[in-house]
Amino acid sequence: MTPTRVLAWLVGVAVWLAAAHALAAPKLRTRIQPETVEVGDVATLTVTVTPGDGVNQADPGSLPAGCTVVGRSISPTFQMTIINGQVTQGVVANVTFQIRCMQTGDFGLGPPTIGISGSRVTGGRVALHVVPKGSLPPRAPDPFDPFGFFSGGNPIGQLGEPILPTEPDYPIDPRYSLDHPRDSQLFLHATVDKTQAVVGEQVTLSVLVYADVKMADPELADPHEVGTSEFLRQSLLKPDANIERVAFARVNGRVYAVAILRKYALFPLHAGELTITPMRVSVGRGGERAIDALKIRVTEPPLDHRPPGYKMGDVGRFFLTADVAPRNVQRGGAVAVNVELSGQGNLPAALTVPTRPGVTWLDPDVKEDLHVLDAKSIGASDVWGGSRRFAYVVQPTQEGDLDLGEIAVPFYDPQSKSYDVAKASLGVIHVTPGAAAPAADDIKLLPNLPQVRTSLGGTRHAEARWADGNAFWALLGMPALAFVFAATGRRAKQSLEQRARQRRESPVADLKQRLRVLGEADLGSDARAIDGATIRVLESAAVAYANVNVRGVGGEAVTSVLTRAGTSAAIADELRDLLEACAAARFSPDGGELEEARKRSKRARALCDKLQKQAVKASQKDASPDSLPESGPVSQEESSEE
């Protein structure tokens, strides 16, 4: 290899190593809030480190004379995001310094230095303006941007920042105030503008998120949409819109920030009591939040004064316009008929065209422009509507002046509670002779029909048929009888197999099997596998001994459901803590330590014994000894022997 090639190879390796180091290096974002303070007030210097694994030291850097650090903290946060089925997880560390300055002036702070796993990374400098005491007006929210919505960032993540120093400064909107919160810090609330409607009438559904202004940054993830299978649903929010913040509200004496999570126009598809099933979202490690199911009572529009041709669901306020060209055409030519249907509500997807002799209508080309209508032009907000354009081609097959008739769309107006008809007259076209053959006037409709009878025929005598005999019916019934015997035997066999399968799949048998799997995992070197098996053992033990399924339940809800089922508070708290410890270690980036995982496995077996003893005591030994598994046969030692 020549010296030139060696030098080129070394340069390439150096460039690759530099790029790899740049990609692996953590990213730091430095900011200070507020940027202007009075003498003696505290400003918060925040450094966000991504990824934040291994952050163990932090130094704010050089501070000007008269400024001191009065508090600091390092807060790593594990984040897991699910987008289109792809899971992204990592750790973000927020390092905060509380800085107080006792003299006025413009100061440069930093740069802060962060220690990460033995190395040090430097952030950026920030500017702080300190003014005399009493120079600043009381801080209040910007009425045009009360949540910092236009300043970027997570719109929900800023709900908990201390925007206002005093409660009277919050601009409370009484329309969003509630009597009782569904949760002390963050909850979902759903409203509809009406609980009674007719088929096809718009019902506006709003899903709101309430967050206590004093809480830490909430993290909403993994949304499960509301169930509206009995409605036609249209979103009233733009597809790419961020979460829209609307107001502050007072709930049971506390101030909450309110944001719109979802807003839909729902159109009932049939009459009856229709259900809107709950929407659910995950809230960081705080479990799950959901709305209550809503009921809408839907009836059909009244029969009185219902116009001919009305189709169920045509509800709103519609208008029709039509354009016909050309008016003079040869026989067999083409005439363009463009019809526009516009208005409010769920516009019909098809029109009924008039039937005239000598006129053939071809299927239309349909284009639609449906959206949320302008509130100023119609005098109401969140109204769905728009227009549909139908482009027809009409072929005349007769000569002369042909009246195309009119197109009509009957509809029911829920505001005036009356029917109306949108009409568009198509007028007359003049057809001249053309190359196409004229249509025959004597074409016979349904030519295969028999001739009209003018008198009664003679009486027909019944003919003897072999199917009238008893032997025929006996032979006909034999296959059915054989099928009944076969089906009965098959059903009995399936019943016996099902009973045997149920005995094998009982909760106690499932717990035994999962304890064996846990023993096998203990013999391995995968800490995540041990924690996963431990979680499944605890869930199965809760089902077997407390008849409670805690899978998918988080936080204090685990303790609540177990204690209601008769489990002691101490055992319920221990089971909850062990579940949370296993889950945290299992989803941590390094997977947790092997010895700690084995200790949690041993605690799980001991907890199963406690649950078993409590169940035996509660049943007063009514259950047989075989109905409850012993911890000995499924211990780690026996699993090793197996």
Image: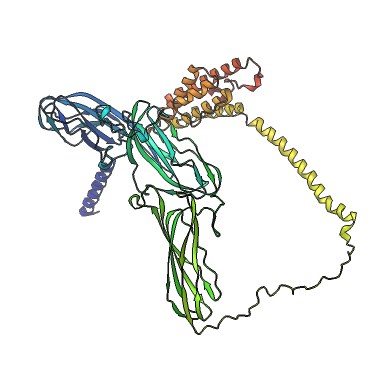
- As rendered, which of 612 and 388 lies closer to the eye? 388
Residue 471 percent across, percent down from the top left = 90, 54
In the displayed structure image, the side of residue 618 where residue 80 appears, left or right: left
Q: How is the image coloured?
A: rainbow
Picture quarter containing residue 486? top right
The one nearer the camera, 451 or 19, is 451
Q: Height in image: 517 above or below 477?
A: above
Q: Nearer the viewer, residue 69 or 213?
A: 213
Residue extending farthest front = 305
Q: Quadrant of the C terminus?
A: top right
| Residue 438 image position (x, y, % from top left) | 55, 82
Task: Give how far across and how far down residue 575 sits, in percent.
Answer: 48, 22
User: As rendered, which of 493 and 636 lies closer to the eye?
Assistant: 493
Q: Is residue 576 left or right of residue 130?
A: right
Q: Is residue 467 visible?
A: yes
Name the residue at 53% across, 19% down.
567
Quadrant of the image occupied by residue 461? bottom right
Q: Find residue 535 and report its horizontal and vertical position in percent.
A: 49, 28
Q: Is residue 118 visible?
A: no
Q: Is residue 636 above or below residue 13?
A: above
Q: Is residue 372 left or right of residue 150?
A: right
Q: Tell me if residue 433 comes above or below residue 63 in the rendering.
A: below
Total number of numbered labels? 0
